[in-house]
Image (cartoon, coloured by chain):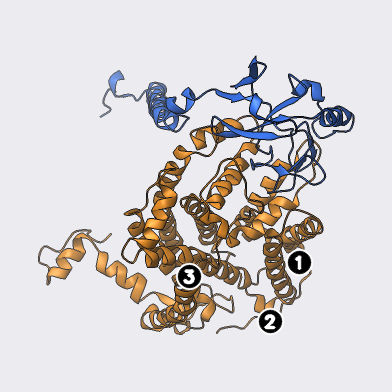
Chain colours: A blue, B orange
Amino acid sequence: MAEKVSKKDVVDHGKRDFLSGTTKAFGAAGAACACYPFIKSMSPSAKVEAQKYTEVDLSEIAEGDTKKVIWRGKAVFVKHRTQSEIALAAAGDKTVSIDPQTDAERVKKPEWLVTIAHCTHLGCVPIDGSTENWACPCHGSQFDVSGRVVKGPAPKNLEIPPYEFLDDNTIKIG
Amino acid sequence: MAKQQVNPNPSSKLEWFEDRLPLISFMKAELVDYPAPKNLNYAWNFGSLAGIALILQILTGFFLTMHYKADAGLAFDSIQHIMRDVNWGWLIRNLHMVGASFFFIVVYIHIGRGLYYGSYKSPREILWGMGVLIFFLMMATAFLGYVLPWGQMSFWGAQVITNLISVIPLVGDDIVIWLWGGYGVNDATLTRFYSLHFLLPFVILGVVFLHLWALHNRKVKSNNPTGIDLKKDTDFVPFHPYYTIKDTFGLAVYMLPFLFMVFYMPDYLGHTDNYIPADPMTTPAHIVPEWYFLPFYAILRAINFNILFLDSKLLGVIAMVSSIAILFILPILDKSKVRSARFRPIYKVMFWAFIANFFFLGWLGAKPAEQPYTAMSQVATALYFGFFLALPWIAKIEKTKPLPTSI
């Protein structure tokens, strides 16, 4: 007694797959969107972002001295270089090989070197070195008087933050 | 199939309860009747000791959270408050601090036991893998916890370890800023580290449950010093009272050095520099991680050369992570059918050489990053990985001793 199968009773697999596929896709997209605010909440807050600039008074840094300042939570070296140090940095242009850069590319005025004070390896603050200008206490990287890496493991030169001279005695970092 | 329904006329309140939640029978099966091999030696004590160490950390940590302040301006002083003002605060903190170190000692011995007796081999690959995962989580938790006192070592440890993530190509730097919640390690970092330090132990607890589930699986069960599969019922004894009493005795022995350290030398394994408040401007002249990270730290520092386009920084991190992650694939690397080192003359020598080399790496990790230590670290790192990479070949050439038919 073969019953007549109405069209209604036949499962349309194409339609079912489409519906289940789109449901999963929209569900996943919705879940991903819902994650966004939580992930973003961990990014630097508006308060952190607001502290964007640090001004440094250069008149109090004697020739040959280095001042450490904080810019956005990072330490920054502001070094007042002597004539012999400037000459040394220029001489280094030919010898640095890990991350080649000329001293002129790294400074706005030769007597002032402004550089992030965190080793480009794992972020320690270098200290005065015996053979080079700075040596990292953590893993032994060394940096010359232009902040360029002369001995690894640091892969890059000390970073130069954005800065500008407001006048002869003041710089604004950031 | 038997009718899966509750008994409408239970003979006791216990049966009524058990029909609804078989908790008592579960506990009895896993903690009392669990058939344990009767020849387990004292090396097998360290699993339950690790569990006790974890519980102790969670308990002492919970009480510390009642007095600790996760704020860059208050954290350092709140530790002194715990040590000086809080009733018995010094004891709870010392237990937590020394407890972390002892947890690692116990887990290192536990892992060493697994290596020596081939506990990672079939059918225990997943059991072993869960263990390696627990070890990773433990290291993360310990690192996060060490940041909380906000001393110099806390701060610069956090700086160095978080910077490891910056080696990820393209997005690494952005991920680090996201993780810090700023442009350097700062107050936001401390607060989230505290949050994670509270959360992770419970994640560990969850993975420990999976670890034990895989162990108590009746198709798997405990390995034993002979490494052979046990088939006879007489090879087993019930867990209680045989191993409950042995584990309790082991715990008492463990407590002697542990409490000695807690009471008489709580800071011995720490660093004096961590009693200087965090200073984002100055890195201590000699920074070293906690002792339990030293071997891996030595491996990180050993890679100070570039290979092709990969720089030393990335390679160092890859080497350090691989040095632990390689344990995941140990069941694949070691193809020898014999589990226990007792019957593997070559592997036995390799094992002890590996352990000696591991201590050597630990010693090197505490030395400054200069010659001759760097060259020594490179040799020791090569030996460390050499151990694992030689295993497939050793399995082929090794003449194993005849296995006993039963214990």
The mark found on residue B47 in the picture is 3
User: Which x, y percent locates residue B208?
Assistant: 43, 60
Residue to which mark 2 is pinned: B402
Q: Chain of mark 3?
A: B
Q: Of the residues under marks 2 and 1, which one precedes in the sequence?
A: 1
Mark 1 surroundings: few (<14), some (14-19) or many (≥20) residues within 10 A: some
Which callout, 1 or 3, points to the residue nearer the camera? 3
Q: Foreground residue, B173 or A72?
A: A72
Q: Residue furthest left?
A: B9
Q: Of the residues under marks 1 and 3, which one precedes in the sequence?
A: 3
Left or right placement of residue B234 versus residue A142 in this view: left
Residue to which mark 1 is pinned: B394
Asked whether disc 2 touches disc 1, contact meaning CB atoms under 8 Å apart, the reply is: no
Q: Secondary structure at mark 1?
A: helix
Left or right placement of residue B241 versus residue B388 in this view: left
> In the rendered image, is residue A166 in sight?
yes
Q: Secondary structure at mark 3?
A: helix
Q: Secondary structure at mark 2?
A: loop
